[in-house]
Image (cartoon, rainbow, N blue to C red):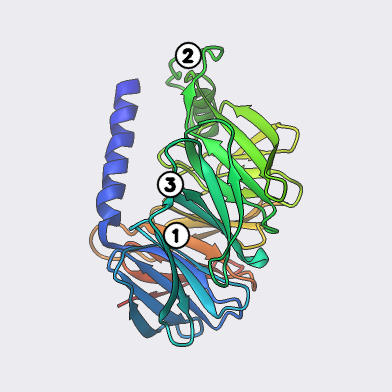
Amino acid sequence: MKQHLFLTFLVALLFQSSLFAKNLEAIAVHPKGQYLVTGGENRTLYIINTSSLKVTKRVWTHARIKRLVFNTKGNRLMVVTDERALVWYDTKTWQPVHKIEKNVYRLTVAAPLANVAVYQVRNFSLPSFNLVSLDDGKVLKTIELKEKIRISSLGLNAEGSKLALLTASSKDESEPKERTPRDLKGKERYLFTQKHDGRKTQLIVYNIKSGQQERSHTLWYRPFGSSGELFIGDKDEVYITSYANGHLKVSKDGSAEFFMLPNSYCYGKGFSDDGKMLAVGGLRKGTVIQLSSMKSVFFELDNLPGFPEYFSELTVAKNGKAYAVTDAFRVIEIDKSGKVRAAPVY
């Protein structure tokens, strides 16, 4: 049974890799809301009017696009590429005006409301991170860790003052390793597997101003199928998301609350800039959740011909609407009631 589940999960990952080979991977909404941008494997930025969902401009970027972030004023767009580079574009001319390359390693996260981003520096000794301005890429602060750890995910709070790190999983000799009972389903099955797999992760939160570690928690949880996305809430709670739709809220005291959402897998994920909302999407279906109340809105796409459509990335705008892109080269708008509007991107 365990081998069967592993093979099923492996097939799902392979499908995900093949499906997402040439899709849209990133999305960001302009601070004033009049347009959004998206891009991905075909190295093109698409500027899309939010009222009509029609493409108004295309910009060739030379590199594959992994993440998009506007600065506070909306006059700059930071593009994270697959060539380990961060490129800033002027949003009037759509010309590149600044570039950071060579020492950018893997992980980049942003706090648009604070006008900053953090990227992991390519360093083969001890991990380090640069805090940069979203206006011009200027390095504002460098944080150097005191120990060598394998990092799977990064996250910031909305103020850009705290950085959370989730380590890659490692063996936990103190945790019992048991086979998951066949009769367990859903949340109970997920929890049992997580708490009896003999693995652990470490969640570490740093104060960016001082560069010092504030707290560290050992977790029985690890994101299945992806490195996960992190965000630090306004009460210092850390949200960790997972491809396999098993998510965790870790309070300041280290207590953990596990939750799942109405859709199945979470191929695409995204927090609102203020961290109050989370949007996720899997196979045609998704959920937007208000994290303080855990109230959620479910949504579903129409069924296109051919292989099923998957969400790639989602975000939540200031007006409460969520936006997403899919592997079928569509842009999606989800209103507060869950009503969906979709348009092709070409």
Left or right: 11 as drawn, with respect to 279? left
Q: Is residue 74 shown left or right of residue 124? A: right
Is residue 169 among what the camera can see?
A: yes
Residue 271 shows up from this direction: no
Tell me what residue is drawn at x 53 percent, y 63 percent: 315
Circle on res. 313? 1
Q: Secondary structure at mark 3?
A: loop
**Identity of the residue drawn at 62% across and 63% down:** 273
Q: Residue at x 65, y 57 (%)?
A: 275
Label 1 crowd (10 A; few <14 / some 14-19 / many >=20): many
Label 3 or label 2, whichever comes before in sequence order: 3
Q: Which one is earlier in the sequence, the residue at label 3 or at label 1?
A: 3
Numbered disc in front, either 3 or 1 = 3
Q: Residues within 10 Å of mark 2 (few under 14, many from 20)?
A: some
SS at mark 2 in the image:
loop
**Which of 123/86 is in front?**
123
Q: Quarter holding the N terminus?
A: top left
Image vertical order of residue 30 relative to residue 8, above or below = below
Asked if residue 45 is positioned above or below residue 25 in the image, the reply reads below
Residue behind mark 2: 177
Query: Which amino acid, by three-letter code, is at mark 1?
Result: Glu
Query: Which residue matches tag 3?
Result: 122
Q: Earlier in the sequence, mark 1 or mark 2?
A: 2
Q: How far across and down, in percent of the image, does residue 156 sit?
A: 62, 52
Q: Nearer the viewer, residue 168 or 214?
A: 214
Instruction: Measure the C-alpha gap from mark 1 to mark 2.
Output: 34 Å
Residue 268 drawn above or below residue 43: above
Circles 3 and 1: CB atoms closer than 8 Å? no
3D distance between C-alphas at marks 3 and 1 = 25 Å
Contact (Cβ within 8 Å) of mark 3 with mark 2: no
Alpha carbon separation for disc pair 3 and 2 = 35 Å
Residue 23: where, in percent of width, then height? 31, 63
